[in-house]
Every structure is written in structure tokens, then in C-alpha cells.
Image (cartoon, helix red, strand yellow):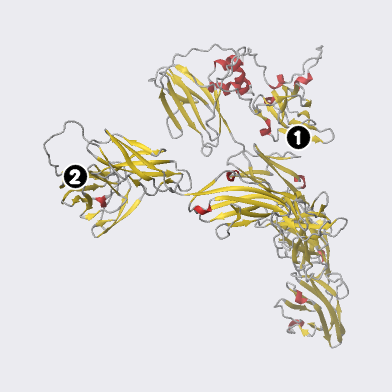
């Protein structure tokens, strides 16, 4: 529970010291912080700022004497941390000069507003040192800068405010301090807003220090504290004490009465001092109170008296759980920066580091739960830069790169030659289907009409002219909007001249080489486009035209009507012919259409042929076998193979894209074609799986993407292993130890490789064939006396790390070390174990070379059949599976190295219980006392006898009772014996293992004679024998299930009768549910937690040699009713019923009827 913030003492009074505890340190500072001068340069103490202007404050700190980086805070007033306000208005910057070791901190206020006036403080802390500097900002209107010093005839104040509004009457000065002192706490914010108070909390704290006469309260013994501070989601208790314990108390929040609820708990407690304490328990859960409504003023009202307090709720910092990604786009694409924070409804501030974007129509901010997004609808080159997002507990940034879009011409406009009334179609194709454009004829824009139409479908732009006229001839140009590009072609009008002189003329083919032809007989067509080749033919009479590809003739049919040859117009490849003109058409050109085409024209006057080669060009096939060959910490090398088919045009280069595995968003890596088939991708995140794909580009366009590469992860090798040391050296081995690398990275650590080489050599030999996973290794097979250098390399999927080397070579020679036994502390004294226990002694030792350990018992070598011994390089183990008495003795360990040795002796004693004492006898009887004596047992169990236990028994009852325990002497006196009885005694001996298995009975008995007058007459002894007789019968009982009960009766008889308990005439055996007791003839049967199955008839039978007697009773066990405590069951129906527990109402129990018995 948070502690209340105590009210400040008035000035001039010493604060009261708390009793029994120390004063806490100041907020945010450790108790041992030393105030020192760390500032080299401080902000000026008083600064005048004009409204709307920018102002910068600089502070410098010398870190040459500091052990760690200093932390800087900029504060306004006494409590407001400006670091949480960083953004468009407040900007902070930190730089460090390595030469002078001086940190420079800057705070810049953009466009000062009236609310920025007030006191500020910059505070620097570094471990146990701190320093602070205060400064103040005063606001001045920009018009005040135009005041003139001397007011002459034409001079004076340039006060333009009189032109804007009427002058207001001067209001008298108001003392804000008096207003705050006399005002209700709920009106503080209203007064602060009215009079322009920016540091309200600071003024309230200073107000508490002012000397105010405390008002005497008749209702309160102890009022609420002035204010409380609590973290969001915590619990807080407000407590006050009143005089009258029975008075009615009300609690208010911001003037509204608080009612008891699940959130608010009101308690009152009465103490021995007659004080009345009302406790208001206020529990705040962050999931239910996102807007901190509990930060309010509270008051307790008792009659006419009131006491007030304020509760300040501290909001925990909001962290960023998903960082911002970088974007690489082209002009006009949509950009969406997205982050995710730890809480819903959190405030996120977005900013561009250079431009400080305003929230206009271009930039949209979107919230979806914990997700926050900054959306740029259409990116431009001005949007390039670093974008930041801040919360009060975190910061992230993302870079936006925008490339200018390039427009490519995929199909140019071709020149056309048409005749009157024919249709002319100009067509071009560009790379962007969103680009629009305009058509021009001889520099004049072409407007649509009934005869002229312009279409734009996808990437294709067409200009269609129907019923061509001579005036349509000219130069036509298409200009895309927004690009410095133009496509031009010429329209030729073919006039038809009719020669009325009948004549014969050999046929002639007139090819137009200005269109699609790139040479005399070659035509290039882009795959998918339409080819229309119009060939002019002359000759009289009209010649017959035949088109063929290779040896295959293209089908047609003749019709001499009106002197025209009509060819087939059906199919993808067709011939359309008229008089003097033959058109060869290919719809949607394909790669198989490439080849040599022959046109042959014949008439009676002769024949003419022409061969054309039609070349189909297309985009290339996708590149193949894209794979990653090597990776680095933030980069990867990608290789691929060129496409099998280049589309008929040389491949200019490649475009690459990458994405994170599992993501659907691809990022372009280059906008200019890359000529090589090897590319190094950079600026990747280590430990993230990526995939790559590649596009091939030729003069026609871009291919389909290649298959995705196998996922790869940018990783780097680890740093070198640390603290490589030599642990041990022998004549042929060297033991090395080291620690893991400081930096392992996302690639993990697979193991280590140990290498060695002789001093002066350069060839390193690998000592381990497989990777060593432990941080230690023994290199074997080394030559004696050689100096060897060692190194260790860490290995992961990224490769080998830099090696860790020993500072100097190691000489392979064993060093003799004296043998030394490190005997454990518990073995330095007598080692005692009981018979049957196991003995496992581990004795460590040291010495070089390996010592020889030998065990001896009582000066003789130990028998390996009785004792097991195992020796290792560092210890020896003596093991006995089951200890016996003969294992006791002194064991000596001898450790030898050549002529050197060390010895240690261990005494082991195996003990067991002693035998009974010897010769127990009654030596004297007097009054009510009897004296006993005995001798120690012959077998003491191999350890000292610690005492004896003496018991007595009356010869009539023969029940044994203990007289003495732990009696150390071999004699004792039994007192308080009963007159007229005869007693016998028995004695147990005791040692460390316990009492002896059997006691020793006394040889004689002790008779306690009666004292007083002796009758002379002979009186015969009374016969005490009688058959069993119950003096108190069993009584019927009714009990509740689950509660233990008992039934009792009493019996007499001699000899002592045998007691038999039965239930429903069945003998009760050794059932742990029942406990049978017999105390001087009073018989009790205890039944532990009976159930309904334990009800029935119980009987008790007493039997001796003279006869028997029996009594019985009925025990009724009933289930708990609904009103009783415990477990209850509500039953209903027949067959299979459901039961309900009355205590928790949660457990359903199935009950099954079977043979009239409920289970």
C-alpha cells in the first residue's frame, strides 16, 4: 500500500523527525548522492522569449572524473519531466566529444507559447554524484520589441493592439496565493486556468510551507494527509480519526458521495482510545480505468467539519512491443508505418526528424487497439527521411526511401499507310498502366469526334481514325502526362489512281520498310501484340497472292466477284487481301510464329516473290537456382543463373526483392538493373529468416519472378572464447579450460575446436575430430619437453570465430606434487554406523603424478570380499553395502607417489542394540518400597550402555507400568507400591541404538505386607473368581455422518475376560476405522468419521473360563440436512441420480441404486 505524502512544514519551523526510522532520501535520488559541480556550462538564469519564436538551451557536463555515463533530466517546475513531452514542441539532443570527454545536452523549444513561461531545472546524475541548474523563461509579446526609448512628437509606443480591439479597463491586482489558500481543492484547476498558472502543483507545495494558523477541528482527532501518491493499478487506503465513534461519516470524490461497492470499501474501527477510524479502501485496476479517473480530490465529512486530500495516480510507462520497419518504395506508392505498444489507448507521438510533418490530408494516423499506424497515401521525394515514434516509455524509428519512377516504352508507334475510307490505328504500350497521355497531330492536340476515337486499356494507348481522308495524313505524336517523353509516327495517305487504258503489267511487290522492319526483310514483333503487314501489289491484270511459311501455304479461298480476291479472315493467323493490297495479320503473336514468310504474286504477265523474316521478341524467362552462398551479421551473398531463354533480346540486368519468411510484403533492393548474377544484400536484421527472388529485364520488359530462394538467416560468428587457461600438464597431455564467448549472437554456439602447434611452427594441428561442447578439453599425444602453443576457436553455423590464444607456449612436462589427503571433517572423529546401514566414505586427495591409494584395517590389508574400494585421479571411495559388527576397527589410508607418502586414520564403529541386563533381583522390601539390583549386560552392542528402563507388574493383573527411564545406575528403588500386593519387575538396557530387544525379569518378587493388628482366628481366603458381568450396558445412539463418535460400556470378571466387538454379528478385526480401548474394565469403541454404511447393531462380548456375557446397541448414522454445516447431498428420482454439495454448490456426484444399497 502506498504511503501518503506528508504535508510540508511552514517556513521557520524545523520538521519533526520520525520516531524509530530514518528520513527517506529525496525523490529520484539515492540516499548517498553527493552534490558536486559537474556542469562546465549551464543555461542562462533568465531568458526572455518572444511568442512564436524558437529558443535553445545548452548544458555541458565534464565526464572525465565519472565512472559511468551521466543521466540528464530537463524539468519544468519541480515535478514535470519534459523527457515525456519530447516531440514537435520540445526537442532534445545529446552529443559527446571523445577528445575533451564532455557531454553536450540541448533542449530546443519550437514556437514558444505563453504556457512555456515559468521556472525550469536541468539535473545531471552519475552514480553517487549529481548537480543541477535552474533557469527561468519569461514571455514577451513581439510588439513589445518595437517600444521606443524616447517619446518625441512623432515617436512613441508602436502598440497595434488598439487597432484590433477596444481597450479594457484595468483590473485590480489579485493575490493568487490568497485565492488558493481560501479555495476548495476542487477549484484549484479552475483558478489555475483563469490566472494562467502553469506550475500548479509546485505552487501548492509552496503554499503548504507558508505559515498558516491551523483551524481547530472539534470532530477530527486526526485528519487526512494533504495528498497521496499511488501507481496506476495499485491499492490505496485513506484513513482519518474522529472524536465521536457513533457519528455518521460521509466520503466525497470531487464533491460526489462515494457509495460502498466492489471498488470502494468503507470501514470503521473502534480502538481503546475511543477513536473512530474510517478507512476508505480504494482499489485501482489499470484494465478498468484507462483514463485515470481516480486522480481526484477526496474529502471526509463529519457534520459541519471536513478534511480534504488529493490522490495523484502515476501512470506506468508505455513500452513499444513491435518496432517500426523500414520502407523502400517508388513515387506514388502507399506507405504504412506500424508499431505496437504495451497498452491500449496509449498516446503515441509521430515525428519526422527533419521536416516535422503536420497532420494534413497527406498523412493519416490510425489506431487499432495496441497498434498505431502512420499512413502516407502517395509517397513523394520530399517524404524521404527518418520517421520516429515516441511513447513515454520507448522510442522507435524507421527509414523511408523513395525512388523516382521510370517510364519504359514497351511498344512504339508504327508508321501507317492507308487508303481512303480505310481505318488507321496507332498503338503504343508503356510500362505503367496508370499513365495517361494526349495525342497530337502536327503539334496540335487531337480531339475525339465521331470519326476519331482514343482509348486507354491497361498499358495500351490507341488512336483510331475511321474513314481516312487525305487531310488525316501527317505526323502523329503521343505524349504521356508527367514524363518528358514522346512517341511519334507518320500517317501516309494512299491515293488510288484508275488507269482506263487496258494494259498488261507484270506483278510487283512494294514493301514499306519504314514501319516494323528493322532491315530489308526482317520484322520484329513483341509477343502478345498484333502484327498487321500491309503489302502493296501492282500488276495488270490483278495478280494472285499466296502467303506461305516455309513450305506450308497459308490457306485462303478465291472469289472473282467484282474483280476482288477475298481471302479467309478467320483464325489467329490470316490474310486479308483486296485489289492492289494484301494484309498479313497475326493476332497475339507467339514464339512459334517466328520464321521466314514468303509472299508470291502471279498474273499472266509474270511473277514476283518476297521473303520476310518475322522475329518474335518477349520478356525473358525467370532466372533459375536462386540461392544464398554466404551470410554475415547484417548481409548475405545471393547468386543465381541467367534465364534459359532471353526472350529474343539480350538481358540487360536483374531486379532483386526480399521479404521476411512468413510475410507477404516484398521489398525492392534495387531500382536500376543490376548486370551481374551475384548480389550482396545488406541492411538485414541478424537472426531473422529471409527469402529472395530475382527478375530478369531485357528491352521488352521484366520477366516473371524466379522461385523463392531457400530461407536464410543473416548471422555472424561468435566472438573469441574468453579466459583460456592451462588447468593441468603431464608428460603427454595438457588440460585446457576457457569460458564462453562474450557475444554469441543469433547463430548460437555449436562447439569448440582446439588446435596446437610447436613453438616456431606455422601449421596448426586440430586436436579434436568432433566439436567439443564443454568448456574444457584434454589434448593427448603431445611430445615430452616440447613447447606447444594452444588456441581455441568457437564454431557456429556462420563459421569460426577469432581464436583465443595462450599468452605464452606451454612446456609438456609433468610437475611432481606431494601427495596430500584431504580428510573430510566428519571423518576426523569416530565414525559410528548401525548394523545393516551402508558405509560410503569419499576421501579426496591431490598429488602428481597420480598417487597410489591403499587401505589397511588394524594394520592388515583389507579383505576385498568384505569391503569395496574404488580409486580415481582425485579421490578414493570405501564402500560397505551392509555394515556388521566385525567391520568395526581402525582403517588407515596410505597415499604414495614414488618415495613420497601421506597417511590418514579413520576409526569406524558399527553398533547395535544391547542385550538384557544380568542377575536382576529384589534385594530388600520395606514399607511400600522395594530395592532392585542387577548387573550390566554381557553384550553392550559395541557402544556404551547409556541407561536402563525399569517396569513393574502386579501379580494379579500382570499389566506392566514403567517405574524409571534412562536410569544410569545398576540399582533403583521402586516406591508407592500397594500394600497387600505382590510385584515382579523387569529391566531393559539402553544404548545409542535404543532399548534391548528383550527385558530381564527379576528372579524374585516383592510382597508388600499389611501392617497393624493380627487376627488370631484363621480366616480362609475369599474366592475372587467370577464369570464376566456387564455393569453398564451399551446405549443406542444417533450421530451425524462425518463426525467421529464412540460407544461405551463397563464389565467385571476374574480372571480378566477377553473382549470381542461385533457389528451386525460380524467380528470387527484390525480395521483402522475402529479403535478399541479397555481401561480398568471400561470398554470404549471409537468410530472415526462414520458414514451411512457404518450404521447397524453393535455388540460387545466378554468371555473368560467361567462364562460369557454380551450387550448390544443400535447406531443410527444420518446424513447432514440442508441447514447443518458440513457436506450435504440432495437426492431425487430413481436409478441414477445427481447430487449437489450444499457447501460449495459446484460438485455433482452420481449416485447409483444397486440391490437397495446407495453407492
Question: Can residue 891 be seen in this snapshot?
Answer: yes
Question: Can residue 775 be seen in this snapshot?
Answer: no
> From this viewpoint, which residue is outermost toward the bottom?
604
The x, y position of residue 268, in whole percent, is 41, 25
Q: Secondary structure at mark 2?
A: strand
Q: Return the residue nearer the eye: 1123 or 415.
A: 1123
Q: Residue at x 55, y 15 (%)?
A: 182
Say the numbered circle drawn on residue 1051. 2
Badge 1 crowding class, 10 Å Cα cut-off, few under 14, some 14 to 19, many 20 or more, is: few
Badge 2 crowding class, 10 Å Cα cut-off, few under 14, some 14 to 19, many 20 or more, is: many
- Considering only vertical position in the picture, is 857 above or below 101? below
The x, y position of residue 533, in whole percent, is 80, 74
- Considering only vertical position in the picture, is 135 above or below 1087? above
User: How much space separates mark 1 and mark 2, taking CA atoms?
Assistant: 101 Å
Q: Return the residue nearer the eye: 1078 or 331.
A: 1078
- Considering only vertical position in the picture, is 1068 above or below 103? below
Q: Secondary structure at mark 1?
A: strand
Say the numbered circle drawn on residue 93. 1
Q: Quadrant of the C terminus?
A: bottom left
N-terminal of the pair, mark 1 or mark 2, is: 1
The x, y position of residue 836, in whole percent, is 48, 53
Q: Quadrant of residue 668?
A: bottom right
Amino acid at each position: 500500500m502506498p504511503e501518503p505524502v506528508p504535508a510540508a512544514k511552514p517556513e521557520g519551523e524545523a520538521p519533526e523527525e520520525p520516531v524509530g526510522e530514518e528520513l527517506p532520501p529525496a525523490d529520484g535520488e539515492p540516499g548517498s548522492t553527493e552534490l558536486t559541480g559537474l556542469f562546465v556550462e549551464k543555461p542562462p538564469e533568465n531568458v526572455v522569449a518572444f511568442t512564436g519564436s524558437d529558443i535553445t538551451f545548452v548544458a555541458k557536463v565534464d565526464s572525465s572524473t565519472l565512472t559511468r555515463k551521466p543521466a540528464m533530466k530537463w524539468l519544468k517546475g519541480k515535478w514535470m519531466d519534459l523527457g515525456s513531452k519530447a516531440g514537435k514542441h520540445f526537442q532534445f539532443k545529446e552529443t559527446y566529444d571523445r577528445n575533451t570527454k564532455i557531454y553536450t545536452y540541448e533542449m530546443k523549444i519550437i514556437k514558444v507559447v505563453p504556457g512555456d513561461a515559468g521556472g525550469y531545472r536541468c539535473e545531471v546524475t552519475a552514480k553517487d554524484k549529481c548537480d543541477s541548474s535552474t533557469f527561468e523563461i519569461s514571455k514577451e509579446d513581439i510588439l513589445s520589441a518595437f517600444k521606443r526609448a524616447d517619446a518625441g512628437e512623432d515617436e512613441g509606443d508602436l502598440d497595434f493592439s488598439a487597432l484590433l480591439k477596444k481597450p479594457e479597463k484595468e483590473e485590480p491586482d489579485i493575490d493568487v496565493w490568497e485565492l488558493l489558500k481560501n479555495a476548495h481543492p476542487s477549484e484549484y484547476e479552475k483558478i489555475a486556468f483563469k490566472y494562467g498558472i502553469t506550475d500548479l502543483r509546485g505552487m501548492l507545495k509552496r503554499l503548504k510551507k507558508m505559515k498558516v494558523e491551523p483551524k481547530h477541528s472539534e470532530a477530527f482527532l486526526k485528519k487526512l494527509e494533504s495528498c497521496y501518491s499511488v501507481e496506476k493499478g495499485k491499492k490505496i487506503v485513506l484513513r482519518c480519526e474522529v472524536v465521536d465513534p457513533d457519528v455518521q461519516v460521509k466520503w466525497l470524490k470531487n464533491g460526489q458521495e462515494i457509495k460502498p461497492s466492489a471498488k470502494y470499501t468503507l470501514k470503521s474501527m473502534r480502538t481503546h482510545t475511543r477513536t473512530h477510524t474510517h478507512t476508505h479502501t480504494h482499489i485501482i485496476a489499470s484494465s478498468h480505468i484507462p483514463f485515470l479517473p481516480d486522480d481526484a480530490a477526496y474529502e471526509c465529512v463529519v457534520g459541519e467539519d471536513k478534511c480534504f486530500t488529493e490522490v495523484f495516480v502515476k501512470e506506468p510507462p508505455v513500452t513499444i512491443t513491435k518496432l517500426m520497419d523500414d520502407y523502400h518504395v517508388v513515387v506514388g506508392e502507399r506507405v504504412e508505418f506500424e508499431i505496437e505498444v504495451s497498452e491500449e489507448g496509449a498516446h503515441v507521438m509521430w515525428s519526422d526528424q527533419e521536416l516535422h510533418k503536420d497532420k494534413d490530408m497527406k498523412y493519416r494516423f490510425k489506431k487499432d487497439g495496441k497498434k498505431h499506424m502512420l499512413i502516407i497515401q502517395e509517397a513523394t521525394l520530399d517524404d524521404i527521411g527518418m520517421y520516429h515514434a515516441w511513447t513515454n516509455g520507448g522510442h522507435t524509428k524507421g527509414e523511408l526511401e523513395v525512388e523516382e519512377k521510370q517510364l519504359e516504352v514497351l511498344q512504339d508507334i508504327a508508321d501507317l499507310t492507308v487508303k481512303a475510307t480505310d481505318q488507321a490505328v496507332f498503338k503504343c504500350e508503356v510500362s505503367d498502366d496508370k499513365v495517361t497521355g494526349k495525342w497530337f497531330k502536327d503539334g496540335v492536340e487531337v480531339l475525339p469526334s465521331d470519326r476519331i476515337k482514343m482509348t486507354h486499356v491497361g498499358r495500351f494507348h490507341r488512336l483510331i481514325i475511321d474513314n481516312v481522308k487525305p487531310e488525316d495524313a501527317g505526323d502523329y505524336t503521343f505524349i504521356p502526362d508527367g514524363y518528358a517523353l514522346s512517341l511519334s509516327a507518320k500517317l501516309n495517305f494512299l491515293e488510288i489512281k484508275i488507269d482506263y487504258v487496258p494494259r498488261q503489267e507484270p506483278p510487283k511487290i512494294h514493301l514499306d520498310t519504314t514501319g516494323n522492319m528493322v532491315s530489308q526483310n526482317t520484322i520484329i514483333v513483341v509477343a502478345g501484340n498484333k502484327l498487321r503487314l500491309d503489302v502493296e501489289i501492282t500488276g495488270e491484270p490483278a495478280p494472285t497472292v499466296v502467303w506461305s511459311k516455309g513450305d506450308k501455304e497459308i490457306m485462303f479461298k478465291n472469289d472473282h466477284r467484282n474483280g476482288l480476291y477475298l481471302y479467309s479472315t478467320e483464325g489467329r493467323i490470316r490474310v486479308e487481301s483486296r485489289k492492289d493490297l494484301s494484309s498479313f495479320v497475326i493476332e497475339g503473336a507467339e514464339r512459334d510464329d517466328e520464321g521466314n514468310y514468303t509472299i508470291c504474286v502471279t498474273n499472266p504477265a509474270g511473277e514476283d516473290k518476297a521473303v520476310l523474316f518475322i522475329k518474335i521478341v518477349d520478356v525473358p524467362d525467370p532466372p533459375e537456382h536462386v540461392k544464398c552462398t554466404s551470410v554475415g551479421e547484417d548481409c548475405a551473398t545471393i547468386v543465381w543463373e541467367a534465364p534459359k531463354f532471353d526472350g529474343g533480346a539480350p538481358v540487360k540486368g536483374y531486379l532483386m526483392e526480399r521479404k521476411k519468411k512468413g510475410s507477404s510484403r516484398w521489398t525492392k533492393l534495387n531500382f536500376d538493373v543490376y548486370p551481374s548474377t551475384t548480389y550482396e544484400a545488406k541492411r538485414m536484421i541478424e537472426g531473422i529468416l529471409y527469402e529472395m527472388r530475382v527478375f530478369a529485364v531485357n528491352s521488352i520488359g521484366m520477366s516473371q519472378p524466379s522461385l523463392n530462394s531457400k530461407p536464410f538467416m543473416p548471422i555472424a560468428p561468435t566472438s573469441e572464447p574468453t579466459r583460456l587457461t592451462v588447468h593441468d600438464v603431464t608428460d603427454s597431455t595438457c588440460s585446457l579450460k576457457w569460458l564462453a564467448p562474450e557475444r554469441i549472437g543469433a547463430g548460437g554456439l555449436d562447439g569448440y575446436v582446439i588446435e596446437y602447434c610447436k613453438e616456431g611452427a606455422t601449421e596448426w594441428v586440430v586436436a579434436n575430430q568432433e566439436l567439443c561442447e564443454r568448456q574444457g578439453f584434454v589434448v593427448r599425444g603431445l611430445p615430452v619437453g616440447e613447447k606447444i602453443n594452444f588456441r581455441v576457436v568457437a564454431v557456429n553455423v556462420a563459421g569460426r570465430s577469432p581464436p583465443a590464444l595462450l599468452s605464452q607456449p606451454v612446456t609438456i612436462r609433468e610437475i611432481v606434487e606431494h601427495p596430500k589427503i584431504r580428510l573430510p571433517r566428519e571423518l576426523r572423529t569416530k565414525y559410528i554406523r548401525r548394523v545393516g546401514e551402508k558405509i560410503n566414505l569419499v576421501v579426496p586427495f591431490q598429488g602428481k603424478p597420480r598417487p597410489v591409494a591403499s587401505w589397511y584395517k588394524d594394520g592388515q590389508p583389507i579383505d576385498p570380499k568384505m569391503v569395496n574400494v574404488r580409486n580415481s585421479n582425485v579421490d578414493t571411495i570405501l564402500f560397505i553395502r551392509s555394515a556388521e559388527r566385525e567391520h568395526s576397527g581402525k582403517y588407515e589410508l596410505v597415499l604414495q607417489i614414488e618415495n613420497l607418502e601421506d597417511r590418514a586414520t579413520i576409526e569406524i564403529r558399527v553398533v547395535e542394540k544391547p542385550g538384557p541386563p544380568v542377575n536382576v533381583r529384589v534385594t530388600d522390601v520395606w514399607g511400600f518400597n522395594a530395592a532392585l539390583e542387577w548387573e550390566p549386560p554381557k553384550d553392550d552392542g559395541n557402544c556404551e550402555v547409556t541407561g536402563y528402563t525399569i517396569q513393574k507388574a502386579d501379580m494379579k493383573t500382570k499389566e506392566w507400568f514403567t517405574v524409571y527411564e534412562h536410569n544410569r545406575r545398576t540399582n533403583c528403588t521402586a516406591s508407592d507400591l500397594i500394600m497387600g500386593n505382590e510385584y515382579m519387575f523387569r529391566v531393559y538396557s539402553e544404548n545409542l541404538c535404543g532399548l534391548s530387544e528383550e527385558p530381564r525379569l527379576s528372579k524374585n518378587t516383592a510382597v508388600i505386607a499389611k501392617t497393624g493388628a493380627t487376627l488370631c482366628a484363621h480366616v480362609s481366603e475369599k474366592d475372587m473368581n467370577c464369570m464376566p458381568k456387564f455393569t453398564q450396558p451399551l446405549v443406542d445412539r444417533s450421530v451425524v455422518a462425518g463426525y467421529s463418535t464412540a460407544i461405551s460400556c463397563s464389565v467385571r470378571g476374574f480372571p480378566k475376560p477377553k473382549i470381542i466387538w461385533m457389528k451386525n454379528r460380524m467380528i470387527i478385526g484390525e480395521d483402522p476405522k475402529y479403535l478399541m480401548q479397555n481401561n480398568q474394565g471400561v470398554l470404549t469403541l471409537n468410530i472415526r468419521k462414520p458414514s451411512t454404511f457404518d450404521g447397524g447393531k453393535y455388540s460387545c462380548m466378554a468371555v473368560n473360563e467361567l462364562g460369557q456375557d454380551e450387550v448390544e446397541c443400535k447406531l443410527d448414522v444420518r446424513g447432514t440436512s440442508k441447514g447443518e454445516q458440513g457436506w450435504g447431498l440432495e437426492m431425487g428420482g430413481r436409478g441414477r441420480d445427481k447430487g449437489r454439495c450444499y457447501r460449495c454448490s459446484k460438485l455433482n456426484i452420481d449416485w447409483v441404486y444397486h440391490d437397495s444399497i446407495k453407492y
